[in-house]
Every structure is written in structure tokens, then in C-alpha cells.
Image (tube, rainbow, N blue to C red):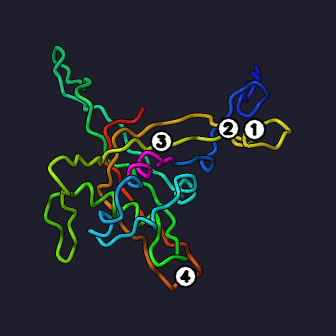
Amino acid sequence: MLTFANNLWGAPEGLEAQRQDLWLVNLKPAIVYFSSLTEEQFNAVGLSKNDLPDEDTTALYAVRVTLPVQKITAKPFIQGTVPRNLPSYVDALDTARVDFLHEGQNTRSPIFTLLQMWRSIVRIGRIGATGETTFLLPDETFKPQYKFDVVLQLLSGDTTDVASAEDLAFSAQYTLIDCWPRVVQHGVIDRTKGAQLHVLSAQFALQEII
């Protein structure tokens, strides 16, 4: 007996698989906040406010995103005489990694300026590493903000024939709550291969994904 199964993926009014290359990362809340700081505060850590990236084009810097695993701890429990794993508390999320393109046209990459200023705010009031300029509290009323929501917007191609801004419509959106950069790392710098793009990797600690 033959059974014919209809494949609903990609069929009209069926299921549509999300392409992994259609997405944007929105860092606007962080950029708006750092843009509100003074030039003197940037100069205190050896940076320039003029090097901050534009909030409308920052999404173009991100080329790769790796989201953390969401885990629930399994707790061993004896049921009768049979050992079983039962759900326990929710594990703290690991970091989310975002790889950014490093711009080479300017003396300092805008995305590196953003990440370094963000890192300085995270470390505010603490002793820096050897040779690192620390960010001091300007006065007793200053309340620095170092956690921001990062929005990952998944996109889908529009099926209409009209060329407009809606050619790439949002298909889903995930918000990474209360992110702050835990690790900022330059990618491999290697001349043994052909022309490769240099990236900056940032690992963001976060509270949850909604």
C-alpha cells in the first residue's frame, strides 16, 4: 500500500522555513544611551564620541549570531526503585555571541568604539587592567546604565511584486533582555590565506530571551 504525503514546506498556504541569512540585530537602545554621554566621558577612556556608529546602520556590522542554549536542570529522583530525571530549576543562560565586521576605513572602527565604551561603563569605578584607563564616576548623582535589550529580527522575503521598504518583512523577533558585553575579542588576523574579513566578536551576558 502506497501512502502519498504532501510536503507543506514552501507550498502555497503551507509552512515557510526561515532562512538563516535573513536577519538584523538592533542595538539602538545602547547607541542612543552612549550618544547621550559627553565627549569628556569618552576622552576619559581614550575614545572619541564622533567614532560611534550610526544607529540606523549598525545592523550592517553584525554578520553572525549564536544564541545560548536554554537549559533546565535535570534532578535525579528515585520513583519507587527506579531512578528518573525530573525537571528542576532553570539554568542561567550562557552568553550570546555576535560577530561584527571591523571597519578599516577610519582610524578606529565604530563598532569597536561602541563595544569599548560599553565595556568601560560595565567596569565603571573599578581598577582597570595594566595600562587601561578606567572610567571614573563624574559625580555622586551619576547612575550609569550598562544593560540594554538587544533585538534579533528575523526577516522573510515579501511575495508581492511591488518594490518597497517591505521587500524584507519581519517574520519573528527575539529580544535578548539586559545584555552587557562580557567578552570582546578580535578575530584571527592571518595573511596565509586569501583576503578574509576581520571581525570583532562580542559575547553578551543576558538575563533571558523572549
> On the image, numbered disc 3 is attached to which residue?
151
Q: Secondary structure at mark 2?
A: strand
The amino acid type of the residue labelled 3 equals: Val
The amino acid type of the residue labelled 2 equals: Ala
The amino acid type of the residue labelled 1 equals: Asp
- Magenta stretch secondary structure, dominant: helix
Q: Which residues are magenta?
A: 26-33
Q: What's the residue at 31%, 73% (across, down)? A: 46
Q: CA distance from mark 2 to mark 1?
A: 6 Å
Q: What's the residue at 68%, 38% (across, down)? A: 169
Q: Position of residue 22 (x, y in %)?
A: 63, 47
- The disc label shown at residue 193, or none: 4
Q: CA distance from mark 3 to mark 4?
A: 34 Å
Q: Height in image: 54 above or below 48? A: above
Mark 4 crowd level (few <14, some 14–19, many ≥20, 10 Å Cα): few
Q: Position of residue 9 (x, y in %)?
A: 70, 32
Furthest-top residue in this view: 80
